[in-house]
Image (cartoon, coloured by chain):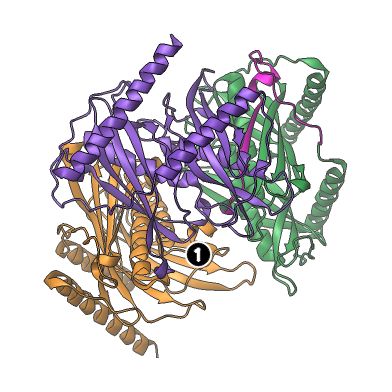
Chain colours: A purple, B orange, C green
Amino acid sequence: MLPDDANIMGNVHGGIILKMIEEAGGIVGTRHCNTQSGDRCLAALVRVEKTEFLSPVFIGEVVHVSADITYASKHSLEVQVKVMAENILTGSKKLANKAALWYVPCSLQNVEKIMEVPPIKYVSAEQEEEGRKRYEAQKTERQETKARIEEVMPPPPNAERHTVGFSQSSLIHLVGPSDCTLHDYVHGGTTMKLMDEVAGIVAARHCNTNIVTASVDAINFHRKIKKGCVVTVTGRLTFVSNRSMEIEVLVDAASLVEKEKGKYRAVSAFFTFISLDKDNKPLPVPPLKIEGEEEQRRSDEGKARYLQSKAKREAEKGRQQ
Amino acid sequence: MLPDDANIMGNVHGGIILKMIEEAGGIVGTRHCNTQSGDRCLAALVRVEKTEFLSPVFIGEVVHVSADITYASKHSLEVQVKVMAENILTGSKKLANKAALWYVPCSLQNVEKIMEVPPIKYVSAEQEEEGRKRYEAQKTERQETKARIEEVMPPPPNAERHTVGFSQSSLIHLVGPSDCTLHDYVHGGTTMKLMDEVAGIVAARHCNTNIVTASVDAINFHRKIKKGCVVTVTGRLTFVSNRSMEIEVLVDAASLVEKEKGKYRAVSAFFTFISLDKDNKPLPVPPLKIEGEEEQRRSDEGKARYLQSKAKREAEKGRQQ
Amino acid sequence: MLPDDANIMGNVHGGIILKMIEEAGGIVGTRHCNTQSGDRCLAALVRVEKTEFLSPVFIGEVVHVSADITYASKHSLEVQVKVMAENILTGSKKLANKAALWYVPCSLQNVEKIMEVPPIKYVSAEQEEEGRKRYEAQKTERQETKARIEEVMPPPPNAERHTVGFSQSSLIHLVGPSDCTLHDYVHGGTTMKLMDEVAGIVAARHCNTNIVTASVDAINFHRKIKKGCVVTVTGRLTFVSNRSMEIEVLVDAASLVEKEKGKYRAVSAFFTFISLDKDNKPLPVPPLKIEGEEEQRRSDEGKARYLQSKAKREAEKGRQQ
């Protein structure tokens, strides 16, 4: 990990980790889907399951990313990725992240054509059955989740500190060759990196401290983004607890040269950030000043997600004891 | 020049050229200012004179940047930079850019302390006298140009095509280590690259074609930007002629962690872009729909700049014939 | 040199220097080979002679790379490259590296077609004769060196400290557009940068200190690597002396989508690293625990190379006195 991968406190950005996770997943997925005859294809990311950042990674550490295919349906496959961070000076290793990603094989001849996935071998019938359950669960969720098409309003010019408008941030990015796969569509990992970047700026503007990504909600990739598009990534706070901030991030894409295609919502997700002091201990987060019904509704929904994942974490802890 | 340095038509971004120009200027300036005893120092960019992009540069070409110190006052120095693009396959070379930059030596011990510049030798008394005139002219201009402190208003949500609001664009960038000099301030060239990026997106949104930087007005660097700041770069059209677009670009900086320092205007400048067809021939530009008094005033000022530089170009042509 | 070019102690990675050397060599070689009629062509790297890193380079230094064509045979040419590092604050300059590279001109129309090299002028008959000797020597060596096709075994899961398995490391890299030349093959310099990166991680794992590249053995580029390939770079210790570590680095490439083409050994080389304390003074290196006959054989071969190059260095010293 290099200085540019990290913030000024030396914490590697969550977006850099997400980008590496997706790169590993894409390689493993593409390699598997080409072990059969027929059109050559690329594994395109369609969904990342909710993922937690378990330990911070620092500049100078060596990061190991390993990826395994854990389930294959007819047209999609699940890749599980593990990220270990190693301090090569002390020899210590820690688990930084575990993630599950879903891919769909797209033909290189015709990107709209979904190919079949070669079957994989399971260690046991139980393993296959569990994979099938995860597959069904995400399929249902993906069908339920429609792209949030709500227009993002620009923040008022002189927003008061600690309001939603005060920290709302947008960036634009012109998609270049290095952002893209072999068929000239943006890598899912590149999009996640930009999303984490904007979310991080929103969080830092709200609390003016060192902030790090704690978790990312399940992300569905509704539509692909092509080379030459301009991507607008906007982040805004939805809910703040004592120790965490939830930020909604919306990704809109528009072709610069094909104006008739218009602007469309490509991805949206919720990122959770925490604030850290100099010794990497969590700090309290300033409360969020809610203005208007819309912000209240989004905050209530965020609180529900917060309580649900808190309950889940505690249930898991109970089971482990 | 690599694919990442260029747009999808293969034209290298003007911002990449500006960044290389400033890098060369900074090296030559810093080297010269350290040829004396006293504190070690860095040459900090304070002004770039108006510069024209004479020929487009393409992916695969080798770019040669040469820089010479052409004038030294007590506390500042002028560096003239020439950019040649060479096609190493055909052997052809062309002049891509000529620029003049002003630097001030800042002590590495105390960045606020301006050092003295060692004198240079001139070929002739005329050469020195011409340099002195350029020095006085830019000094007067810098004193006259105050930072435009006018707040940038966000565009209306559903702006009509070809209005100012329709193409107005902003990006945010978190300043990382690679953006900075040895004393942790942003390289002037990095700032110019971001400015060109935003201006290019504004221009492409207005005319939906391949666009390239034609020229950049004199840029004054009012205030320095430190590592760890968030930079907001906003571009908006001011004036459109038959064949060119003038875009005002405003750079605001704010420290993420030192909230008391607030947001400040660091740089502002006017970029001129032209629209090209597939054979790199200029295309007509759609007229700009002006709304309100403010936009009319900015357009009138832009038109005055446009006519002035047109008159100047024709006067130069006349002189050459 | 920027922060991202260096390790956490500020020493610029040897791989960054190697990449710049190859970039300069490729430009000079390609330019020369196109000074004749016929197909346009690119100079493709086929071999780098053994090169020593004479002084460390630090962040903030300005690096000057100069390249000259020193010999031309019918189908190949030798480029000698010199790297000077300049501290622009103190004005001091030092020789950082001297290297000799061999290129072959490949047609841009058909990458398999080797073009003829235009003749060069020699200052003297002796100069030409010396070049011819170097040409014959490397030709013989290249013919003798077959690609090491031995499979790399993964290290045992719980390897003991200071064994070969403990520090063995691999990275995979998906070849993107910025890694490639105009005909979509990986720059030799990019491959060497990845090799140095892996070798550096192996060395740091073995001795847990600040390490730097001391030298690189002659590298032969057996086969080209194309855009879209996945490259696996593996490094393992072969021999450790009191003050140095020799690391064998193997580069395997495989197309992600054309599986029938299989995985192939593209490059292999030996890197020598030394361990430094805070004042950049050499430190003793922990002895290597050899396990099994294969490791013993590789260590014996490494020792022979070590003794040979030590004898050569001493002979040169003797001649200079």
Query: Which quarter of the figure has residue C294?
Result: top right
The residue pinned by badge 1 equals B8
Magenta range:
C149-177
Residue in the image at 22% along x and 53% along y: A154
Can residue B226 be seen in the rendering of this structure? no
Above-or-below relation of C245 to B233: above
**Residue A191 locus on image (x, y percent):** 44, 47
Mark 1 is on which residue type? Ile
**Residue A320 locus on image (x, y percent):** 45, 12
Query: Which quarter of the figure has residue A142?
Result: top left
Can residue C290 be seen in the rendering of this structure? yes
**Residue B258 locus on image (x, y percent):** 21, 36
Above-or-below relation of B242 to A123: below
**Residue B149 locus on image (x, y percent):** 15, 57
Residue lying farthest top? A321
Above-or-below relation of B285 to A282: below
Main SS class of the magenta portion in the image: loop
Tell me if residue C166 is in the magenta stretch: yes
Chain of residue at mark 1: B
Residue in the image at 79% along x and 62% along y: C114
Q: Residues within 10 Å of mark 1 (few under 14, many from 20)?
A: some
- In the image, taking residue A17 as reference, residue C183 lies left or right, namely right
- In the image, taking residue C231 as reference, residue B153 lies left or right, namely left
- In the image, taking residue C9 as reference, residue B249 lies left or right, namely left
Residue in the image at 38% along x and 40% along y: A196
| In the foreground, C40 or A84 | A84
- In the image, taking residue B169 as reference, residue A173 lies left or right, namely right
| In the foreground, B304 or C137 | B304
| Quarter of the image that includes the C terminus of chain B | bottom left
| In the foreground, B321 or C16 | C16
Tell me if residue A110 is in the magenta stretch: no
